[in-house]
């Protein structure tokens, strides 16, 4: 078992930063806290790191209660968003800092630091100062500085926000590879859903101080439970619907029969744009017809904005102009049933239930 | 993009002449061979030679140096501590406001009131404890009092640049309080501390009024000596002395410009 | 593993420690450290500056002893003396000196502003790589010892020097007249001392100025005064107000320049204070004069902060 938090709450004056957050991160997994700015994800990370004090609740690392253990005694290290380099120290001294703090003999510390710099592919930069490095190199130093201490858990606070888009993709892959090689627990905070999907095993989507949904990357992406999560993961089509039978709904586009039973009387359905398919009008496949308002060419696919409010993505081989009428097929298995936010606030399984499940 | 008119260029030339003419005349007359008055009597270095043999001047120079060095050392230490104490620790908003006023007090108080306040304080202390007879010690304490605030303000500027996260990173990397302080905070404050110390040193050399009030009968510094000599009537020796003081000033200003980070661009 | 009850966890007893910059400590530890850092500096400022300044309120109303000591007797004598009632009946001398100090400070500030604007524009228009050099050129007089700079004027204003000869050639003065001590000499000295105090902050403001506004103003209005009033002045006001405070306040208390260039004929309140603490050994009267100067200073500072706030709010 890696990290568990129970009922962590944090307020800043009147503002609620975190409310009753339960989180369970397995040892050796890459876990991501995803959410918009101000959702409390960084606060949660700082509480785990021991840089912020929870108002109440408990943080356990490997089963040991860490709530009252100082940051400088916790088996946890952080990669800061700003990297927080020590500007007066060289790269090597930066990486050694934690080891020297813990009174590791100098030779051993230097050896370990060099190894870690090798790991992040920064050989030969030992005696540079942080201001002589590029943004990407600084980020690697920050990573090495944290990893050199062999923490139980590595915390990453938006580690790529200072990098440009191209570099970011490359670093994401490298980060994932390092994590898999070391088999360490990584917990990352980000607001970039693509980044979260690229690197993580599991993730939690956070909203206003609470965890909105929690699961493997695939689970969360394929089955967003609430409108907030669906929206944050860029599911663009939201359809208001009413239940008219066990599995049948009435929508503005007609009555559809879904493959699963419907839990509410009136609610929201969602379909990803890439799941909508073109269909020849008039065939039974065609669920609805619409005019194309705008066609956005994206290279490998085109994005069609339709006059009935839906958005769809199709391959770019079918040439369509604005004003053309298209038939659309809505595959029933790709329709996502969304739940009301308040009712379905997802909780991490309680520890013993979890054990039972394993 | 930026434009200047002939008028502003002419005015500026006039201003620089206005600022430098008196200083240059002092330099010129320091090389004057003539003993009396302001008539040019040929080039000579004799005033500089006399200077080196004038015990009184050497002693005043030594005093000036001791005063500047000792007061700078103390005020740098105390001022740095004050800045760290005021801006690194949490204070109630009201208290912080009051402390801020207190910190700016030495900066805005006119010299003469500052001097009067010191004289009163020293006499009260002397009256109650018998310590602090006016002399070099009181001058040093006086200088420290006005230097502290300048050092603290210089260090504060640096502290504001640093931010929380570097200290947090140090804690995250297992550093205790002492290690954070000595290995992270102080090294990062170094440019601010050096700037503050140089400011304090220059202020001490530059000061006349506070020394004049707190010097007592027996101690003298170069500015006090020059003032007293001018009151008696200018001698060419003073020109030479002033020239040297000006040279030291130019050197220290140039050094300060070179070291200060915000004029580097 | 034992199941943790939610109620066991809430609320945690975390109130006995706080987190300060990543460090988990008891608040009392933070308070102790804070006190250690702050105490020496604050004690010095409070006991050697703040309290003595406040004590002026008391000392001003005490009596001068026979040997220049202070007697603990309440008196309003010093106030009366300041208003001009002395041994020999009423004279305007003291009031005149106070009034003159304010006027000299005001005029000095005004002259410095008038001279500093062209200078600030000149400095800001220098190429970036030369600007540090020009700034150093301005900083050297700023840091040169006040006494030396003032006595240097004694040389320049001497009767045998070209400047005085030029004036006598124009029949403005008698040949061989030394131009000090005089009001003219005091102003020359004051302006040369305080000019950098206005020019430097003003230069900083001009350097940061948005020139497109000035160009827009040139497009819209023709008169240079309106350009200055509406495009330049609002942008340079922060620098200007710093310069004004840095000049007006110390100029009121200035004592070296009037002492050396004004002599007994053109005394300012600084000289009067110095006399009381020097030759006259009349501390209570000196304290009363200092008190007046302090009140004037405070008034100027309050006016300056109010003024800049009001202008900034517009």
Image (cartoon, rainbow, N blue to C red):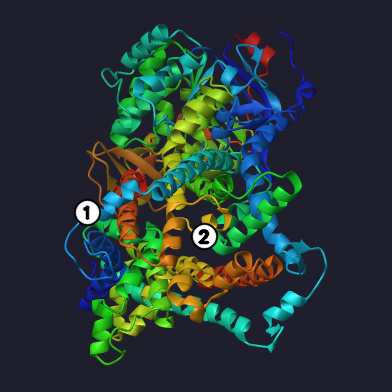
Q: Is residue B127 visible?
A: yes
- Residue C83 position, x and y percent, is 69, 83
Q: Secondary structure at mark 1?
A: loop
Give how far apart the Cα atoms at labels 1 and 2 are: 31 Å
- The extreme left residue here reads B42
* Circle nearer the N terminus (1, 2): 1
Seen in the image, is A15 located left or right of residue B204? right
Q: Is residue A231 visible?
A: no
Residue C162 figure quarter: bottom left
- Residue A21 position, x and y percent, is 65, 29
- Residue B20 position, x and y percent, is 28, 66
How busy is the neighbourhood of tag 1: few (under 14 within 10 Å), some, or many (20 plus)?
Answer: few
Q: Secondary structure at mark 2?
A: helix
Task: Name the residue that disc number 1 marks.
Answer: B45
Q: Chain of mark 2?
A: B
Residue at 68% x, 84% y is C84
Task: Name the residue that disc number 2 marks.
Answer: B209
Q: Is residue A65 depicted above or below B167 in this figure?
A: above
């Amino acid at each position: 078992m890696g990290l568990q938090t129970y009922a962590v709450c944090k307020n800043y004056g009147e503002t609620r930063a975190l409310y009753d957050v339960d989180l369970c991160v397995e040892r050796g997994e890459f876990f991501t806290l995803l959410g918009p700015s101000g959702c409390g994800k960084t606060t949660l990370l700082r509480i785990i790191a021991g840089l912020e004090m929870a108002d109440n609740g408990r943080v356990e690392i490997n089963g040991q209660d860490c709530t009252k253990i100082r940051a400088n005694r916790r088996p946890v290290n952080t990669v800061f968003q700003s990297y927080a380099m020590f500007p007066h120290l060289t790269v090597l001294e930066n990486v050694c800092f934690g080891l020297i703090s813990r009174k590791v003999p100098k030779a051993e510390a230097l050896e370990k630091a060099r190894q870690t710099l090798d790991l992040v592919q920064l050989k030969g930069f030992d005696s540079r100062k942080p201001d002589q490095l590029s943004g990407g190199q600084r980020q690697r130093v920050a990573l090495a500085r944290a990893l050199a201490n062999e923490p139980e858990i590595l915390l990453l606070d938006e580690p790529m926000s200072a990098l440009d888009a191209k570099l970011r993709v490359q670093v994401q892959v490298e980060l994932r590879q390092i994590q898999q090689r070391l088999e360490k627990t990584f917990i990352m905070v980000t607001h970039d859903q693509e980044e979260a999907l690229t690197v993580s095993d599991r993730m939690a989507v956070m909203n206003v101080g609470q965890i909105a949904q929690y699961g493997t990357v695939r689970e969360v992406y394929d089955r967003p439970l609430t409108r907030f999560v669906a929206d944050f993961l860029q599911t663009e089509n939201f359809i208001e619907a009413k239940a008219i039978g066990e599995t049948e709904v009435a929508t503005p586009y007609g009555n559809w029969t879904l493959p699963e039973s419907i839990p509410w009387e009136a609610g929201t359905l969602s379909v990803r744009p890439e799941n909508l398919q073109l269909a020849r009008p008039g065939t039974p496949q065609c669920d609805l017809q619409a005019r194309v308002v705008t066609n956005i060419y994206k290279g490998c696919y085109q994005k069609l904005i339709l006059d009935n409010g839906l958005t769809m993505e199709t391959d770019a081989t079918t040439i369509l102009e604005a004003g053309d009428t298209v038939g659309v097929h809505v595959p029933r298995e790709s329709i996502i049933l969304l739940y009301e936010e308040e009712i379905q606030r997802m909780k991490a399984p309680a520890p013993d239930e979890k054990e039972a499940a394993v | 993009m930026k434009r200047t008119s002939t008028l502003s260029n002419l005015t500026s030339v006039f201003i620089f002449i206005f600022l430098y003419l008196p200083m240059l005349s002092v330099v010129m007359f320091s090389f004057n061979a003539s003993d009396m008055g302001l008539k040019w009597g040929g080039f000579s270095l004799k005033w500089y030679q006399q200077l080196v043999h004038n015990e009184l001047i050497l002693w005043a120079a030594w005093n000036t140096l001791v005063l500047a060095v000792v007061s700078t050392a103390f005020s740098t230490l105390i001022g740095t501590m004050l800045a760290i104490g005021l801006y690194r620790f949490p204070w109630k908003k009201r208290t912080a406001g009051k402390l801020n006023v207190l910190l700016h007090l030495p900066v805005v108080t006119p010299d003469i009131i500052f001097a009067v306040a010191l004289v009163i304080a020293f006499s009260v202390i002397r009256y109650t404890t018998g310590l602090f007879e006016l002399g070099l010690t009181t001058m040093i304490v006086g200088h420290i009092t006005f230097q502290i605030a300048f050092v603290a303000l210089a260090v504060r500027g640096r502290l504001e640049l640093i931010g929380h996260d570097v200290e947090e990173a140090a804690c995250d990397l297992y550093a205790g309080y002492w290690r954070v302080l000595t290995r992270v905070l102080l090294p990062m404050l170094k440019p601010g501390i050096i700037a503050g110390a140089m400011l304090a040193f220059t202020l001490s050399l530059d000061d006349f009024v506070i020394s004049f009030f707190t010097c007592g009968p027996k101690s003298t510094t170069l500015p006090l000596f020059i003032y007293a000599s001018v009151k008696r009537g200018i001698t060419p020796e003073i020109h030479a002395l002033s020239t040297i003081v000006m040279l030291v000033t130019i050197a220290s200003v140039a050094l300060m410009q070179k070291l200060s980070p915000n004029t580097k661009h | 593993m034992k199941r943790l009850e939610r109620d066991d966890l809430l609320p945690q007893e975390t109130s006995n420690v706080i987190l300060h910059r990543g460090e988990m400590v008891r608040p009392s530890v933070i308070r102790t450290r804070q006190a250690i850092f702050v105490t020496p500096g604050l004690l010095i400022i409070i006991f050697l500056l703040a309290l003595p300044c406040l004590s002026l309120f008391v000392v001003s109303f005490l009596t001068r002893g026979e040997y220049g000591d202070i007697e603990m007797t309440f008196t309003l004598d010093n106030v009366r003396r300041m208003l001009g009632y002395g041994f020999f009946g009423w004279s305007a001398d003291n009031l005149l000196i106070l009034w003159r100090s304010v006027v000299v400070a005001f005029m000095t500030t005004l002259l410095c502003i008038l001279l500093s604007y062209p200078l600030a524009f000149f400095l800001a228009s220098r190429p970036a790589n030369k600007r540090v050099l020009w700034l150093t050129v301005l900083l050297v007089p700023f840091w040169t010892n006040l006494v030396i700079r003032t006595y240097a004027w004694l040389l320049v204003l001497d009767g045998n020097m070209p400047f005085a000869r030029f004036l006598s050639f124009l029949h403005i003065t008698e040949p061989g007249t030394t131009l000090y001590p005089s009001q003219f000499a005091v102003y020359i000295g004051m302006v040369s001392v305080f000019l950098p105090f206005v020019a430097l902050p003003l230069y900083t403001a001009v350097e940061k100025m948005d020139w497109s506004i000035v160009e827009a103003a040139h497009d819209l209005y023709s008169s240079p005064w309106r350009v200055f009033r509406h495009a330049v002045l609002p942008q340079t006001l922060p620098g200007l107000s710093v310069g004004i405070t840095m000049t007006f306040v110390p100029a009121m208390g200035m004592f070296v320049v009037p002492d050396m260039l004004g002599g007994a004929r053109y005394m300012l309140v600084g000289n009067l204070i110095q006399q009381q603490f020097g030759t006259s050994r009349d501390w209570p009267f000196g304290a009363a004069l200092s008190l007046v100067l302090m009140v004037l200073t405070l008034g100027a500072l309050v006016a300056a902060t109010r003024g800049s706030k009001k202008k900034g709010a517009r």
